[in-house]
Amino acid sequence: MDPEPDLLKVGEMTSELNKKTRQEIDLVMMNRLPARNPELAFQIVSRGKLLFTRDEQAHNLYKEKTLKIYYDTAYLRKQIKQAFDKRIEEGKFGERDYAS
């Protein structure tokens, strides 16, 4: 697998694609995305448009891995969202209340 480009390189590639296509392009490096952001990875593989792949089998394995991680972490994401919503509702968002 090719190494993931740094943020500056991603910005350059996005700018180049925007100029060539005359459209707003969102370029996302997918290599480690399922572990970093399962929701975004899921949205991309379920709703995104694949423009090119060198290896259909690797692409299918990636989609499978993404779906597994997304569904495996659904409970955790739900718990985090509920705790976040509760802190906002209680007016405690942004406050530290670590156990002493």
Image (cartoon, rainbow, N blue to C red):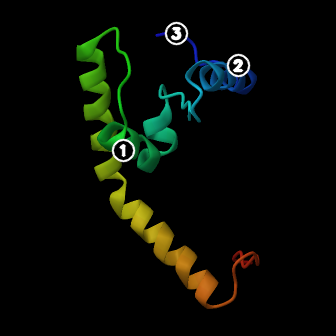
Q: Residue at x 71, y 75 (%)?
A: 98
Q: Position of residue 84 (x, y in %)?
A: 56, 74
- Residue on which the image places disc 3: 2
- Comparing marks 3 and 2, which lies closer to the viewer? 2
- Residue on which the image places disc 1: 42
Q: Distance of mark 1 from mark 2, alpha carbons?
A: 24 Å
**Total numbered badges shown on the rendered structure:** 3
Q: Position of residue 72 (x, y in %)?
A: 31, 50
Left or right, residue 6 beside residue 23: right
Q: Closer to the N terminus: mark 3 or mark 2?
A: 3
Where, by quadrant of the figure, is residue 66 drawn? top left
- Residue on which the image places disc 2: 9
Where, by quadrant of the figure, is residue 61 drawn? top left
Q: Closer to the N terminus: mark 3 or mark 1?
A: 3
The amino acid pointed to by label 2 is Lys
Q: Residue at x 54, y 32 (%)?
A: 28
Q: Distance of mark 3 from mark 2, alpha carbons?
A: 14 Å
- Is 22 rendered above or below residue 38? above
- Is 96 rendered above or below residue 90? above
Q: Closer to the N terminus: mark 1 or mark 2?
A: 2
For label 2, the crowd category at 10 Å Cα-Cα, with few meaning under 14, some 14 to 19 and many 20 or more, is few
Foreground residue, 24 or 65? 24
Foreground residue, 56 or 83? 56
Q: Which mark is residue 7?
A: none
The amino acid pointed to by label 1 is Phe
Q: Residue at x 59, y 89 (%)?
A: 89
Foreground residue, 75 or 50? 50
Marks 3/2 in contact by CB < 8 Å: the verdict is no
Q: Position of residue 3 (x, y in %)?
A: 57, 13
The amino acid pointed to by label 3 is Asp
